[in-house]
Image (cartoon, rainbow, N blue to C red):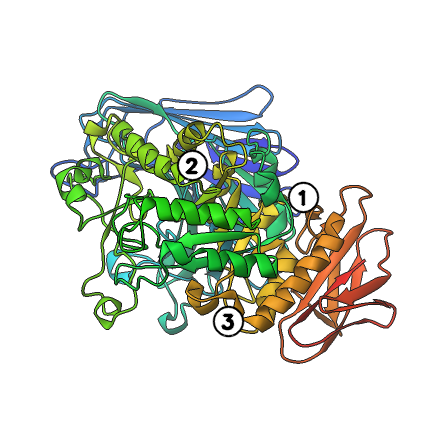
């Protein structure tokens, strides 16, 4: 077989000269043969629906090349197909040019498609790897994808985790949740214990790229989702495919270049793979200057005053007593939820104050009184949805909703509150994702935002700013965009417009829920919930200095407070699921205040320092690795400090080893100011945390 080969110090790629299929992929430094069975090589795959056959597939490795060449310095290969033939034997006038080049330490796949057929190119798999081979010395292989400020990992081997229903696919498949795609998830790792393969977009484009794996022919044993142990079973090759799946909707007569995708091998754990992404992202993204008060160590309270089931908990005129409690306990800000007409998650996108709670002027006056106490007021806001049950939606907003290929709007099932009727999902308010590519809808958002400015709030916290579920593309061309346009494209543009509206309010805070990292070009702060002992602080690692806030709602919630110290999260106190008062949780409040005092005292490390997660140190409990700790680097003197947490209900003793010559000398606990030497080990009581310097 004649082949083309390109190589750098990271990857070696080998292509079939006759088909353009990628038949070999090797991590140069480790020798890991990621692809090592040439007969399973793939190049690309298209979905080209026709009136006769919607699932009309075109497989690149079965096409006839019009041209193929390797550059003189063997740094790139170029393949051209001037027409393609579908699986049903029909030829289509679609020209495809694929260039794979070595750029720095990446192998970059760039594809251009000129659609001369009368049909639409919906999906393109590129790059498309025919069989990801496991690392022979390691015990598992997984995918790793961003999810809600954290990450999800799905097994590839020795078991394979099928995500969609088995009834809808021929083979076990991973396409991830609805948002495991760009821009929320701009990269994916395929990793083992010691090394992995990085795949990520190489352009800040909102065009939809999703990450896909597929196990062929299926399980050896379905009861435990076990991958066949041999290279073939019952006459079928066993292979795990991987692809970046583009969904461009290239119309007849249209030419489009797809978002380039980079591959790169890495050694180490997930941090090493994420570092590849952040080193590229940092070349173009810059974060906003934050209001001064939001840059200091501080805590918040989130409080809900109404829902669609009409609790009507607190009138606007009574809100200052919430401010008094915050001021007494050193809580810097209130996130006020349910203040809008109809309560939380009803009436969207209307941001009129609910008249049953008081007048506009009463809310305005209450905010001013709370601010006079030194406490900020941030209003809960929501622009992603429209409430389907409102007359506004029935009369006008339905025209501005995201539409599917059939011309119907998508709908989100909504959120259930309080009564058995709603908890049984009988009268839940259904939420309709709105199209930010519609100029008219952006104008509506601006008008609704002005109401919050007029109320005198210190900021907004835009709930669900990070997604448009279940919508990914909009097909309503009356909005002024092309068919199949990505609905995430104007996420940042919306906030730019709101920022311009508030241009005379330099200290106004723009916060969102679980903002994906591209959104931090505009947002100052992000809120999320991280109630898990195995929480992966992915966003914190990717953006070490951005303010992140998490919910703390337990009555003696020491472990969540410890997590806030360990991951540099701001505490959002939320007693009774953010429907209670600070005096309801005295144990949590006292421990939280001690933690905030500690990281204020040592802010050069644990607030202003660079968060490195577990990189740069190893913590051991006897002869076992201890996993819940974080390394911070003092930006002034480059010394390292650690936070080590004990989530368990028994005392532990740990030791710490740092990379390099620096040695740790002393430690103290959150609620014990006594410094102790580390020479005899670090003793951490149950549900406690230590800082080590």
Q: Which mark is residue 546?
A: none
Q: Which mark is residue 29?
A: 1
Residue identifier under label 2 = 21
**In the depicted view, which residue is nearer to us: 52 or 271?**
271
Q: Earlier in the sequence, mark 1 or mark 3?
A: 1
> Could you give the CA–CA distance between mark 2 and mark 1, rounded to whole angstroms?
23 Å
- Mark 2 touching mark 3, by CB under 8 A? no
For the C terminus, which image quadrant? Answer: bottom right
> Could you give the CA–CA distance between mark 2 and mark 3, rounded to whole angstroms?
64 Å
**How dense is the environment of label 1, judged by Cα within 10 Å: few (below 14), some, or many (20 and up)?**
few
Q: Nearer the viewer, mark 1 or mark 3?
A: 3
**In the depicted view, which residue is nearer to us: 427 or 470?**
427
| Kind of element beneath mark 1 | loop
> What residue is at 32 percent from the left and 49 percent from the top?
340
**In the depicted view, which residue is nearer to us: 452 or 328?**
328
**How dense is the environment of label 3, judged by Cα within 10 Å: few (below 14), some, or many (20 and up)?**
few
Q: Please say if 3 is above or below 425.
A: above
- One can see residue 27 in this view: yes
Residue identifier under label 3 = 584
């Amino acid at each position: 077989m004649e082949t083309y080969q390109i190589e750098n110090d990271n990857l070696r790629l080998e292509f079939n000269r006759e088909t353009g299929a990628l038949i070999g992929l090797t991590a140069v430094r480790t020798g890991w043969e990621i692809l090592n069975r040439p007969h399973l090589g793939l190049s690309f795959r298209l979905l080209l629906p026709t009136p006769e056959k919607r699932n009309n597939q075109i497989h690149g490795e079965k096409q006839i090349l019009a041209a193929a060449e390797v550059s003189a310095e063997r740094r790139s290969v170029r393949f051209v197909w001037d027409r393609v033939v579908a699986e049903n034997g029909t030829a289509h006038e679609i020209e495809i040019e694929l260039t794979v080049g070595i750029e720095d330490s990446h192998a970059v796949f760039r594809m251009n498609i000129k659609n001369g057929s009368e049909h639409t190119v919906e999906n393109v798999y590129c790059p498309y790897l025919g069989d990801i081979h496991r690392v022979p010395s390691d015990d598992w292989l997984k995918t790793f994808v961003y999810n809600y400020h954290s990450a999800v990992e799905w097994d590839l081997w020795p078991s394979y985790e099928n995500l969609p229903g088995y009834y809808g696919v021929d083979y076990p498949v991973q396409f991830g949740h609805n948002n495991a795609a760009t821009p929320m998830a701009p990269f994916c790792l395929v990793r083992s214990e010691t090394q992995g393969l990085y795949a990520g977009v190489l352009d800040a484009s909102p065009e939809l790229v999703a990450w896909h794996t597929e196990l062929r022919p299926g399980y050896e044993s379905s009861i435990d989702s076990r991958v066949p142990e041999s290279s073939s079973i019952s006459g079928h090759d066993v292979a795990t495919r991987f692809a970046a799946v583009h969904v461009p909707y290239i119309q007849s007569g249209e030419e489009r270049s797809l978002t380039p995708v980079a591959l790169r091998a890495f050694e180490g754990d997930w941090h090493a793979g994420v570092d590849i992404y952040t080193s590229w992202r940092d070349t173009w993204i810059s974060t906003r200057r934050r209001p001064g008060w939001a840059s200091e160590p501080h805590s918040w309270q989130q409080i809900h005053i109404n829902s669609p089931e009409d609790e009507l908990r607190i009138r606007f005129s009574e809100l200052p007593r919430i401010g008094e409690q915050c001021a007494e306990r050193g809580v810097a800000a209130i996130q006020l939820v349910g203040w809008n007409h109809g309560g939380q998650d009803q009436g969207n996108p209307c941001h009129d104050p609910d008249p049953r709670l008081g007048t506009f002027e009463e809310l305005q006056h209450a905010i001013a009184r709370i601010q006079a106490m030194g406490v900020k007021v941030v209003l809960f806001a929501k622009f992603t949805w429209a409430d389907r049950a409102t007359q506004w939606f029935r009369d006008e907003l339905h025209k501005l909703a995201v539409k599917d290929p059939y011309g119907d709007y998508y709908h989100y099932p909504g959120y259930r509150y309080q009564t058995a009727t709603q908890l049984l999902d009988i009268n839940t308010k259904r939420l309709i994702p709105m199209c930010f590519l519609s100029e008219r809808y952006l104008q509506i958002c601006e008008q609704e935002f002005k109401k919050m400015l007029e109320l005198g709030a210190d900021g907004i916290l835009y709930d669900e700013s990070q997604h448009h579920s279940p919508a990914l593309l909009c097909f309503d061309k009356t909005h002024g965009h092309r068919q199949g346009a990505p609905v995430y494209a104007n996420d940042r543009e919306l906030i730019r417009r709101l920022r311009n509206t508030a241009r005379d309010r330099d200290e106004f805070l723009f916060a969102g829920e679980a903002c994906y990292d591209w959104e931090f070009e505009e947002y100052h702060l992000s809120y999320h919930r991280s109630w898990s002992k195995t929480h992966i602080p992915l966003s914190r690692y990717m953006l070490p200095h951005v303010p992140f806030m998490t919910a703390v709602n337990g009555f003696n919630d020491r472990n969540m407070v410890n997590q806030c110290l360990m991951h540099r999260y701001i505490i959002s106190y939320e007693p009774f699921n953010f429907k209670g008062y600070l005096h309801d949780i005295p144990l949590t409040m006292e421990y939280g205040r001690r933690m905030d005092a500690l990281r204020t005292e040592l802010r050069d490390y644990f607030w202003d320092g660079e968060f490195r997660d577990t990189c740069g140190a190893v913590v051991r409990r006897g002869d076992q690795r201890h996993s819940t700790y974080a390394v911070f680097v003092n930006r002034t003197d480059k010394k390292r400090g650690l936070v080590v947490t004990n989530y368990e209900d028994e005392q532990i003793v740990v030791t710490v080893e740092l990379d390099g010559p620096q040695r740790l000398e002393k430690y103290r606990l959150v609620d014990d100011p006594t410094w102790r030497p580390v020479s005899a080990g670090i003793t951490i009581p149950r549900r406690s945390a230590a800082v080590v310097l």
